[in-house]
Amino acid sequence: MKKVLLPLLILAAFSCLIAVESAPSAIVGYVKYPCVAPLDRGSGLNFIALPMDSGWTTVGQLGDAYPGMMDAMSYWDAASQTWVACYWDGYWADEFDVYPGMPVMINALGAFDLYSMGGLPSSRASVDLLFGLNAVMVPLSRSDLSTSGLVGDDMGGDAYVDALSFWDAPSQTWVACYWDGYWADEFGTWIGMPLMVNAVQDFTWAGRSKSVQNLKASRASK
């Protein structure tokens, strides 16, 4: 298995640091994403997510909550395998809709902490992944998914995904874990953490299932 994920991921226009969970209450809470300032070459790309139900319906509302702190935001469109960007031009041009659990890439103009604040979503929606790269978030209810390998196994293993990556904002690069008979270069994950996942077929990720248990049993018997 070759490390083929990174060249495609580097096409990303905007991105972020690892998510840090804040122990939200049963009613309302927040998740904090520390975002880095631009490096010398001018990019301050940070990959965040919107795990809490803040009431925001458009990405411009997110941008307005942090005036002067970012100049572009984007989301990954798995259908076209491209980033779709909204940028500041005196207003938020090419604004797009957002929803709880959505990963968003931002370009920060300086270091700041971005908070996803609000109530816990009433239920965890299933996530439809398409063949190719997909942006997903580790669910708030899944503290057991503490490594990229566990996330990959929960999705059904190498029959469904062969690579996962996170954006390392301090170095402005993607860091990948890939399937090579095992999860090579495995990294730690957290609830609320946005990830890029390479799917080898279309499937729906709805959390732990019998197929995951069967996968573990199959590997244990080998």
Image (cartoon, rainbow, N blue to C red):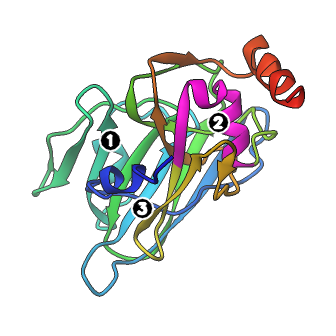
Which labelled disc corresponds to residue 24?
Answer: none
Give the camera-side residue of 6 and 169: 6
Q: Position of residue 133 (x, y in %)?
A: 39, 37
Q: Residue at x 61, y 46 (%)?
A: 180
Q: Residue at x 80, y 16 (%)?
A: 214
Q: Element type at marker 3?
A: strand
Start and end of the magenta stretch? 147-164
Q: Position of residue 190 (x, y in %)?
A: 69, 50
Give the camera-side residue of 161 and 126: 161
The mark that comes first in sequence, 1 or 3, is: 3
Q: Element type at marker 1?
A: strand
**Closer to viewer: mark 3 or mark 2:** 2
How far apart are the alpha carbons under marks 1 and 3?
12 Å
The mark that comes first in sequence, 1 or 2, is: 1
- Which residue is the site of mark 2? 152
**Closer to viewer: mark 1 or mark 2:** 2
Q: Residue at x 51, y 31 (%)?
A: 100
Whether residue 141 appears in magenta in the rendering, the answer is no
Is residue 139 visible in the rendered image? The answer is no
**For residue 68, side relative to residue 168 (left or right):** left
Q: Residue at x 40, y 23 (%)?
A: 130
* Amino acid type, label 3: Asn
How far apart are the alpha carbons under marks 1 and 2?
21 Å
* Amino acid type, label 2: Gly
Quarter holding the C terminus is top right
- In the image, residue 149 sits, relative to residue 201, either above or below, namely below
**For residue 161, side relative to residue 184 (left or right):** left
Q: Position of residue 61 (x, y in %)?
A: 33, 43
Is residue 1 visible in the rendered image? The answer is yes
- Which residue is the site of mark 1? 75
Give the camera-side residue of 212 and 208: 212
- Which residue is the site of mark 3? 46
